[in-house]
Amino acid sequence: MMDALSEIFELEFRWVLVACMFITLFISKHYRQKARKARERDHEILRSDESLPLILARLFVALPMFGAVFAYMIDPEWMAWAHVDVPQWIHSVGTGMVILAVPFGYWVLSSLGDNISETVLTRAGQELVTHGPYRWIRHPLYTNGLMLFVGAGLGAENWFITFFAALTWAGIYHMVIPREEEELIDRFGKDYEEYIQRTGALLPPIRSSEPGVA
């Protein structure tokens, strides 16, 4: 009986993940294309403009994670070797994270508008966005992606996906965000430094003696 229920839960989650993943990708593509059309080509910065170590680090983490998630969506049996039994509440938390990633992603991208960037580098004409989720979180776009992939790992009960999602979280927090914020401080100066003090990097700040840490 429990095996049958587990199969039902897994089947339902797989299609929830497929739907949420493709809706999220569609929303992202729409806003990115809209932003590209709204600005001049001379203002565009490509991923190839970033440093080689950052590009390689992204590929090292992103390729296995994306590959594993898409393999699971095509056929869960392809990722069955990394399956772990977890309490049902963990599966439910993962499912909830995946579902919430859709409206949250829309909120983030609609708040960014034409300021969406493909890289950690800033471009001419870029504005400092501090409304919407940016009122509390400096990098909610990363938060949204991590919510989706951590949720995918937990909901799929798959240690491989969860591990690479956690590794991505660590890499973004310790490598990508510091590099990106150096660029943003160079561009926006004191305004961005003050913004750091009242916001969290990936989560809303916990009010303490060290504001801005999250």
Image (tube, rainbow, N blue to C red):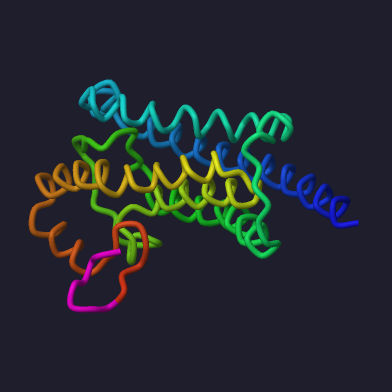
Determine whether 96 is above or below 67 in the image: below
Compare residues 194 and 75 and report the one nearer the observer.
75
Numbered-mark total = 0
Residue 145 location, x and y as percent? 47, 46
What secondary structure predominates along the stretch shown in magenta? loop
Residue 59 location, x and y as percent? 38, 26
Q: Residue at x 60, y 52 (%)?
A: 154
Q: Residue at x 23, y 26 (%)?
A: 53
Residue 181 location, x and y as percent? 19, 48
Quick one: quadrant of the C terminus?
bottom left
Residue 208 location, x and y as percent? 23, 78
Choose top left, top right, bottom left or bottom right for residue 126. top left
Choose top left, top right, bottom left or bottom right for residue 27. top right
Stretch of the chain drawn in magenta: 207-214
Left or right of 67, for residue 168: left
Choose top left, top right, bottom left or bottom right for residue 93. bottom right
Q: Residue at x 76, y 47 (%)?
A: 10
Determine whether 29 is above or below 52 in the image: below
Left or right of 70, for residue 116: left
Left or right of 202, for residue 69: right
| View extreme (bottom): residue | 208
Compare residues 41 and 151 and report the one nearer the observer.
151
Q: Residue at x 32, y 37 (%)?
A: 117
Asked whether residue 39 is drawn in magenta, I would say: no
Compare residues 45 and 9 and report the one nearer the observer.
9
